[in-house]
Amino acid sequence: MARVRDEQKFNQCRESLLAVGQELFINNSFNSVGLNDILREASIPKGSFYHYFDSKEDFGMQVVQHYGEQNMQALESLLERSDLDGYGKLKAFFQSNIDHYGEIDYCQGCLMANLSQELADVNEKLRCKINELSQLIVDRIAACLAGMETRELNLGELSPEEGAQMLMNSWQGAVMKMKLQKSRQPLDMFMKFFFRR
C-alpha cells in the first residue's frame, strides 16, 4: 500500500530548502553554490532534494519565485495602508528596504538583481523568470503612480509605467553601488532625488 504524503510536512521542508537556497545564493552566487552545499546547509540527503526539485536549475527557479513573492507581499502590505497617500506608500516601501540593508551592514543586495547580472547571458529560463517577477513589481508601482502627480517624485512628464521603470532602475543601481561601497549613501541619494518631502 502506497504511503500518503503528509502535505504540511512536505511544504514545510520545501519552504526550509527555499530559505536555505535564498541565503546561499544571495551570499555567494548561483554558480558557486553546489548541490552538496545545499544538502549540507539543509541537513538532508541527496535523494530528498530530488523529492522536491527536479534539478538545481528548477531549485533556482523556485528560489527566485519565492523571493519575488516575498518582495511583492512586502510591497502590497505597504500599498494597502490607508493612513498613507501614494507618495507616502512608495516612500515607506523604499525606506523599509533601506532599513533592511542597514540591518545587514549594506551588503548582499537584491537576489534577483544579483542573479540577473550573473545569469542573464547564460541561463534563459532564469533570465525570463527574474524578468517576469521584476515586471510584476514595476507594474504594481505603476498602478500606484497612476493615481499620483508624478512630478511630485521628480519624474517629470513620464507615464506611470515609465516612472515605475525609472524608479526601479535607479533603485537597482543604488543597491549595486551600496554593495560596492558598503554604505547607505547611494540609497540616501536615491531617496533625496525622488522623495523630497
Image: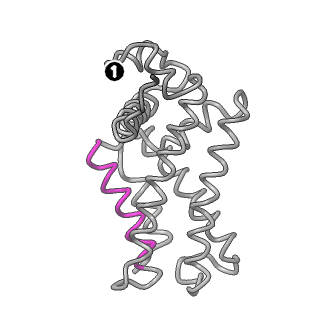
What residue is shown at x 63% (from left), y 64% (from top)?
166
Q: Position of residue 176 (x, y in %)?
A: 50, 44
Counting every numbered tag in the picture gives 1
What residue is shown at x 61% (from left), y 63% (from top)?
138
Q: Position of residue 103 (x, y in %)?
A: 26, 47
Q: Position of residue 62 (x, y in %)?
A: 54, 38
Q: Determine the image quadrant of residue 169.
A: bottom right
- Residue 7 lies left or right of residue 194; in this view the side is left
Please name the amino acid that badge 1 sits on.
Glu
Which quarter of the image is occupied by the C terminus? bottom left
Foreground: 123 or 57? Answer: 57
Is residue 189 positioned above or below 106 on the image? below
- Residue 28 lies left or right of residue 151; in this view the side is left
Foreground: 125 or 193? Answer: 125
What secondary structure is the stretch in magenta mostly built from?
helix
Is 96 covered by the magenta stretch? yes
Q: Determine the image quadrant of residue 117.
A: top right
Kindly identify which residue carries mark 1: 41
Q: Position of residue 109 (x, y in %)?
A: 44, 42
- Residue 158 lies left or right of residue 90; in this view the side is right
Region in magenta: 88-104
Foreground: 73 or 32? Answer: 73
What residue is shown at x 50% (from left), y 37% (from top)?
63
Is 10 covered by the magenta stretch? no
Is residue 37 positioned above or below 12 on the image? above
